[in-house]
Image (cartoon, grey):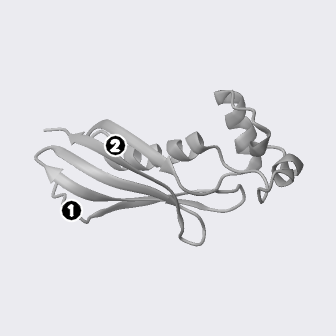
C-alpha cells in the first residue's frame, strides 16, 4: 500500500431524512425537539430540524472505517461542529491524508453541506496492519 500526504480517501455521501433523525434520537436518547419537530425548530430561529452532531460524527467515522476496512485500526477520532445540516439534503463526507509515519497515518476529515461549506471538521489517526 502506497499512501502519501495529500491523497484523498473515497468520499461518502449520506442522504439523511427526518425519519432517520427520529430513529437516531430513539437510539441515542437525544430527544431535543430541534431534531424532529419542524415547528419548534423554526420557532427558535432554525431553518427547520437539524442533524444531530453525533450523527454527523458517526457518518465521518463511517467514512474512515469504510476506507480502512480490515487493513488497520482506528486509533483516534475527533470532530468539531461548525455549521448546521438539515435532512433532505446530501451530507458529503470527505477526507485526506495529512501525515504518514511508518504504519501510522493521520487524516483530516470533514462533512460538507450541498454548497460545499464544511460544517463539521475533524481528524483521525489509524494504524495500518503490518
Above or below: residue 115 compared with residue 47: below
Indicate left or right for 113 with 10 as reference: right
User: Percent from the top left, x then y, of residue 43?
Assistant: 87, 52
Q: Which residue is mark 1?
A: 5
Q: Residue at x 59, y 57 (%)?
A: 83
Q: Residues within 10 Å of mark 1 (few under 14, many from 20)?
A: few
Above or below: residue 90 compared with residue 32: below
Assign a secondary structure to mark 1.
Answer: loop
Q: Which residue is mark 2?
A: 69
Q: Residues within 10 Å of mark 2 (few under 14, many from 20)?
A: few
Q: Residue at x 82, y 51 (%)?
A: 44
Q: In which quadrant of the rendered image does the C terminus lie? A: top left
Above or below: residue 83 compared with residue 101: below
Question: Residue 126 occupies which quadrant of the picture?
Answer: top left
Question: Alpha-carbon distance for marks 1 and 2?
Answer: 19 Å
Q: In which quadrant of the rendered image does the N terminus lie? A: bottom left
Indicate left or right for 88 with 65 as reference: right
Amino acid at each position: 500500500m502506497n499512501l502519501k500526504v495529500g491523497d484523498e480517501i473515497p468520499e461518502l455521501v449520506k442522504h439523511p431524512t427526518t425519519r432517520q433523525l427520529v430513529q437516531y434520537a430513539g437510539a441515542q436518547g437525544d430527544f431535543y425537539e430541534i431534531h424532529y419537530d419542524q415547528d419548534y425548530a423554526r420557532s427558535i430561529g432554525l431553518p427547520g430540524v437539524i442533524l444531530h452532531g453525533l450523527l454527523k460524527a458517526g457518518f465521518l467515522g463511517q467514512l474512515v472505517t469504510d476506507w480502512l476496512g480490515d487493513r488497520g485500526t482506528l486509533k483516534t477520532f475527533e470532530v468539531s461542529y461548525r455549521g448546521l445540516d438539515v435532512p433532505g439534503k446530501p451530507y458529503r463526507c470527505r477526507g485526506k491524508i495529512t501525515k504518514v509515519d511508518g504504519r501510522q497515518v493521520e487524516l483530516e476529515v470533514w462533512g460538507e453541506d450541498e454548497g460545499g461549506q464544511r460544517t463539521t471538521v475533524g481528524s483521525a489517526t489509524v494504524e495500518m496492519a503490518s
